Structures are given as C-alpha cells and as structure tokens.
C-alpha cells in the first residue's frame, strides 16, 4: 500500500513540475478526482480541473466551439497562465478548466431531472450557427448501436452459463428488430440539416456531467459534435426511464422534444441500447458476480417490456 502511495506522490510531483515548466501554472495542491482528472489549487488560491486527453482533435474542436459560444452555464477550457490552450506531454494532452463548486445531479430526483432538461434546452438553443474548421465526424448513433449489439453477441456464453439464455435471446431479438425499424426513418436527413445550420449536441448527458449550485452547469464536452440535437434527448430519455418506473406518460411530460419529433424520439428510445451499454460497462469493471447482475438485469428487462408495449401502442397512433 505504501509503495502505491509513493508512486502516486512521485507521479503528482512530476505532473506539478510539468505544469509549471510548460504552462507556468504554480500548483499548491493536486488531488485525483478520477483517472486522468485532477482537482488543483494554485499558490494564488485559484481552483481548477486538470484533465488528460489522448485525442488532440477533440480538444481543438472544443476550443473552436467555445470561442464562438457564450460561456454561461457551460464550463469550457481556459488558457494556461502562459497563454497555451493545452499542454502536450508525448501522446497526452492536458487541458485546464475552472473548478465549479456544487453537486452532481442524480436522475432519481425529480428536480434534478427537470434541471437537466432545462439546462440541455438552454445549451441546444445557444449551440446553433456555430461552425468550426475541422468538425469531428462520428457515425450515426444507429451505426454505433449496431456495433454495440455485435459486442453484446460475444457475451452470449455468459448468459447461457448462468441460466439466462432466454433473457439474452429476448434482448437480442428486441434490439435487432427496433434498430431495423428505426433505420427506416430520416436520420441522415436530420444530420445533414443540423450540420448546415451549425447545430451541436453534447453527446453524453449522464447525470454526472451536470453540476448544480445556484445554477446548473454542463461539463465534459469530449463527445461534443455537430449534428442532430435529438440524440441528446434520446439518451436523456433512456437515462430517465429507470427512475420514473418506465412510465411513458411521465417521460412525455418532460417535453424534451417538439411534437413533430416525438415519433423519431420514441422509436429510438425503445431500442434497448442502454441495457446493453450498462451490461458491457459492468463487464469492463469485472467486479460483482455475473449471476447476481443478470438476475437484476432480468427484473429491469421485464419493466422495459412494459414500457415497450406502451410506446409501441403510442407510436401506432402518431
């Protein structure tokens, strides 16, 4: 244990020297928040978040984006004391951003869900008519979800070995069917129109990317991209569902999207990509017993079926 602490202390000392030599940032205190993210206090008493990145183009795109956006309720990067926008350390790139004191939202709380929707609406309203020199292109979310499904297929033996083969088959069938149905809608047209209008989306509306004090701020724009903002609401809707008992009426009450987009929105939300995402994330951590997780997944899946039935009924009437 002492050896680990000693290594961490050496690493932090090396980083502190690096930030001073390359960015003229005089650090007094440096504490890990999570992997590659540090809370930092300078000798002058200012507090910052330092973050390590491995993709330079993402940093450059965020800089281009935020230089054209009003910096209200969003936490962008700022320059180092010597004026540099980021520091390069081999294949690593370090950014600095102001530390915002507050708490992370939690979607189990109704007030937090409302705050997330309101803040996201505000961000989307501001994130228009913005054009950068080299926007990062990402595959349409349906293509990414198809890839997620293919990864899911490789985990079939875990379901079979633990007595949950029927659960696996049901998730697989549902995911494949609704991916196919959603693919018939005009997503590519939406993407093209959004790019022409210079519209941007956050890309990761997890509750921990909202910080609240007197106001609610959005942080972590690593997945920022130019495209249809509807994807943020698809993801947000999926993240809300477990906390509103999979009630479609309550989900619609948040009025995330316009009436003309409800069909597309629901058609994507019923695709169980979130169930698969959480499963793959669980496996990446390799902690709790698989059988225990699958037992809980089965209970969640039964609730998902309840939502699916009601959503499909509603889609027929639209």
Image (tube, helix red, strand yellow):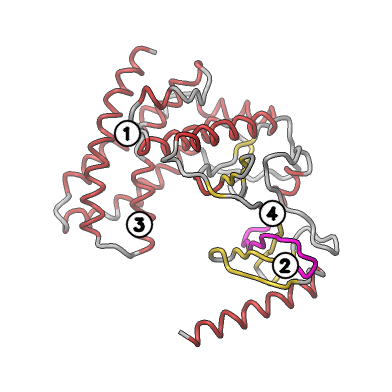
Side (left or right) of 52 relative to 104: right
Q: Secondary structure at mark 3?
A: helix
Residue at mark 2 to residue at mark 3: CA–CA distance: 32 Å
Judged from this view, the residue extending furthest toward the left is 163
Residue 60, position as x, y percentages in the image? 72, 52
Mark 3 highlights which residue? 282
Q: Which mark is residue 88?
A: 2
Residue shown at 79% from the left, 61% from the top = 80
Task: Look at the image and give the residue range highlighted in magenta.
Answer: 42-58
Q: Earlier in the sequence, mark 2 or mark 3?
A: 2
Q: Earlier in the sequence, mark 4 or mark 3?
A: 4
The quadrant the C terminus occupies is top left
Q: CB of mark 2 within 8 Å of CB of mark 4?
A: no
Q: Secondary structure at mark 2?
A: strand
Mark 1 highlights which residue? 245
Residue shown at 29% from the left, 35% from the top = 304
Residue shown at 75% from the left, 45% from the top = 64
Residue shown at 56% from the left, 47% from the top = 209
Mark 4 highlights which residue? 59
* Other-residue count near label 4 (Cα within 10 Å), few / some / many at <14 / 14–19 / ≥20: many
């Amino acid at each position: 244990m002492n050896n680990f602490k000693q290594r961490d202390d050496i690493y932090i000392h090396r980083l502190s020297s690096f930030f001073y030599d390359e960015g003229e940032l005089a650090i007094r205190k440096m504490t890990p928040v999570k992997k590659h993210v540090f809370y930092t206090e300078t000798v002058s008493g200012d507090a910052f978040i330092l973050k390590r990145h491995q993709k330079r183009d993402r940093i450059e795109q965020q800089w281009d984006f935020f230089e054209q956006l009003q910096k209200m309720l969003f936490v962008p990067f700022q320059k180092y004391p010597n004026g540099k926008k980021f520091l390069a350390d081999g294949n690593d790139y370090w950014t600095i951003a102001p530390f915002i004191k507050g708490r992370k939202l939690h979607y189990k709380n109704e007030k937090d869900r409302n705050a997330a929707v309101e803040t996201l609406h505000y961000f989307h309203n501001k994130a228009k008519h913005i054009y950068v020199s080299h926007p990062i292109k990402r595959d349409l979310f349906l293509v990414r979800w198809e890839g997620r499904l293919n990864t899911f297929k490789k985990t079939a033996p875990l379901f079979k070995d633990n007595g949950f083969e029927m659960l696996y088959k049901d998730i697989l069938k549902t995911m494949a069917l609704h991916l196919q149905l959603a693919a018939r809608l005009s997503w590519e047209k939406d993407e093209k129109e959004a790019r022409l209008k210079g519209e941007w989306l956050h890309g990761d509306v997890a509750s921990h990317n909202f910080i609240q004090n007197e106001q609610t701020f959005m942080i972590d724009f690593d997945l920022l991209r130019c495209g249809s903002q509807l994807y943020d609401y698809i993801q947000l809707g999926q993240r809300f569902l477990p906390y509103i008992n999979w009630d479609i009426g309550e989900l619609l009450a948040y009025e995330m999207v316009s009436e003309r987009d409800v069909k597309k929105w629901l058609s994507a939300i019923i695709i169980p990509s979130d169930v698969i995402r959480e499963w793959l994330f669980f496996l990446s951590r390799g902690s709790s017993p698989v059988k225990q997780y699958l037992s809980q997944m089965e209970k969640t899946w039964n609730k998902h079926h309840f939502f699916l039935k009601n959503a499909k009924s509603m889609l027929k009437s639209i």
